[in-house]
Image (spheres, rainbow, N blue to C red):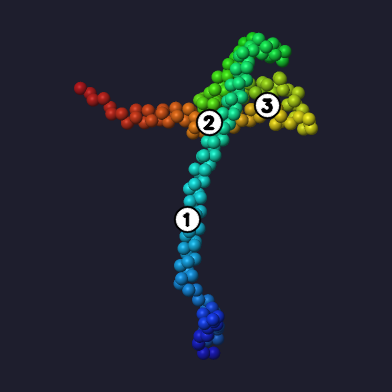
Amino acid sequence: MRGGKRAATIRGRPILHIQTQGTRLVFVVPVPTADIRTGCRRVSVAMDMIASCRRRAPCAENLARDAAGLLTRLTIGQAFAQAGLGKLTNLEGVIEYFASLGIPLARVQAPTVATLEFVGGIALILGLATRAVAFLLAGTMAVALVTAHRSEFAAALRWSPEEGLTGIDPWMYGLALLWLMAAGPGRLSLDRAVLAWWRRRRGKAMVAPAPVSR
């Protein structure tokens, strides 16, 4: 078989070249240069979009974390501040209630818990010493679960149809406080402002010139 070329066309445009090389047939599909350039441009645009999404993903994640931290602090902080204020204005009633639950040293623990809830709630709203305050308040919620809400908590753990964990306030507050301990207050807080100030001061101290000896 002699070598030669043939072309299959549609409306005069070649779509397939058939070449004979000795006893072999070689099929060649021509791709116009313009189509290659268009395809390369589309791939380049797609890669740029993917890279842009990757760059924006950490920013969106940080914004979501900051918003979640702020809203959680405001909500939980308000609840604790109001509860603490209510206890402080009715301290004798709280002492009697603590004593009825069998809590030891009720006259000491009642004002302590009331003050902790009020001051700690304000601290959470401001985002000041967030992890430490959340840890202390989580301790009061643990005590509440095994004293005032013991029966409801036990029923919820037994999957009682009348009780659920979401209906137990100390459990839900404890989860929010645990999240604050793990994730922190976010950038919209006094903790971050104090940390930034301390880092700037430390940086200035490290680059301060040494005193000139005479």
Q: Residue at x 70, y 13 (%)?
A: 97
Q: Residue at x 78, y 30 (%)?
A: 162
Secondary element at image label 3: helix
Q: Tell me the residue at 41%/28% (across/down).
A: 197
Q: Is residue 113 visible?
A: no
Q: Disc 2, disc 1: CB below 8 Å?
A: no
Q: Which labelled disc corresponds to residue 48?
A: 1
Q: Amino acid at mark 1?
A: Asp
Q: Give the amino acid type for the residue marked by disc 2 in the picture.
A: Pro
Query: Where 59 sits versus 177, above or below?
Result: below
Q: Amino acid at mark 3?
A: Asp
Residue of label 3: 169
**Closer to the N terminus: mark 2 or mark 3?**
3
Front-most of residues 202 and 8:
8
> Where's the N terminus, which quadrant?
bottom right
Instruction: Report the residue marked by disc 2.
Output: 185
Separation (CA) of disc 2 from disc 1: 34 Å
Residue at the image point whose x is 66% and y is 23% from the top: 142
Label annotation for residue 58: none
Q: Position of residue 98 (x, y in %)?
A: 68, 14
Q: Quadrant of the C terminus?
A: top left
Q: Secondary structure at mark 1?
A: helix
Q: Is residue 43 left or right of residue 150?
A: left
First in sequence: mark 2 or mark 1? 1
Mark 1 Cα-neighbour bin, 10 Å: few <14, some 14–19, many ≥20 = few
Q: Nearer the viewer, residue 207 or 155?
A: 155
Percent position (x, y) of residue 65? 54, 37
Mark 2: which secondary structure? loop
